[in-house]
Amino acid sequence: MLVSLSSFTYLSGKIDSQLEAILMFKTLTTTIAVIGMSASFAWADVTANKQLVMDMMQNVFAARDADAVDTYFTEDYIQRNPMLPSGSAVIKKFLSRPLDSTEPTPPPSDLHRIIGEGDLVATHSTYYNFGPEPMVAFDVFRIENGKIAEHWDNLIPLREEPNPAGRTQVDGVTEVTDLDETAVNKALVIDLLERMFIGGERLDITQYINPALYLQHNPDAGDGLEGLQALMQANAAAGMKMRYDEIGIVVAEGNFVLTGASGALGEQPTAFYDLWRLEDGLIVEHWDIIAPIQTENLPEGYPGKF
């Protein structure tokens, strides 16, 4: 059978097109498979990192086991709490201090919420052994090669009385959901902070916070946008105007986004840690810890709050 040059060129083109389509399909399916595997690995890493932090809280601090420190912390662990120097040796020394036998043994710490993103794990807890009164804390841990390499936190005393809405600093929803909405939820919260809290823009707040459902856990605020507005007005009237300057850290997982920012409350340098829960693209619940940033008597080589 004779085939003309033009026919050969046509057939070759057809074959090339088919081969190209096959190769493109294989490339696409391979890419999708790689993305799926990467997402699975990322999820596995986050799950493992969260488990590492929970195990550390139980096996190191709850058990007061200084010998377990090396299992969970790097030797050159970076500490951003200004009360303590960096290094795992400091944790061992803290755990080795004798307890006052005349005082009752404090109950174990309560872990209320835990989220993870990438190499970061954030917890919302109540501690009973860090001072004379229970402390509510947000902690963020950075994991490196299976160990905790860096730590940020913010703590304030646990209030005995609920806020004007009848809520405490730690109750509310705990379940992490909507994992596929992590990036969108994170972007919305960052946009709110950067434009309104830092930039001072006058925004339509209902594009960020659900006006029909906004549950507030700030110890001095009531629910809803009215509660938020009343708190900010009361602070301003008392010379304690709230100002955010810069976002220092963000951890997001699904319906939860934790932000840590530096700023001021009145003239006092202040760290603002906010935990936001979102539903259907809007913020519906909020917890916070607002604490002064220590500026004096800092440990040698202190790396800063953020």
Image (cartoon, grey):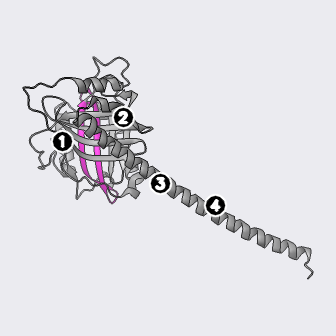
Residue ID for mark 2: 71
x and y percentages locating residue 240 in the rendered image: 21, 31
Could you tell me how far apart the alpha carbons at marks 2 and 1 are, in whole angstroms? 44 Å
Could you tell me how far apart the alpha carbons at marks 2 and 3 are, in whole angstroms? 27 Å
x and y percentages locating residue 303 in the rendered image: 38, 24
| Disc 2, SS | helix
* Location of residue 72 (image quadrant): top left
x and y percentages locating residue 49 in the rendered image: 38, 44
Q: Which residues are magenta?
A: 264-291
Q: Is residue 122 above or below residue 224?
A: above
Which kind of residue does numbered mark 3 sit on? Ala
Contact, mark 2 vs mark 4 (Cβ under 8 Å) = no
| Mark 3 crowdedness (10 Å alpha carbons): few <14, some 14-19, many ≥20 | few
Q: Residue at x 8, y 32 (%)?
A: 104
Q: Is residue 281 magenta?
A: yes
Residue ID for mark 4: 27
Q: Residue at x 91, y 82 (%)?
A: 1
Which kind of residue does numbered mark 2 sit on? Thr
Could you tell me how far apart the alpha carbons at marks 2 and 4 are, in whole angstroms? 42 Å
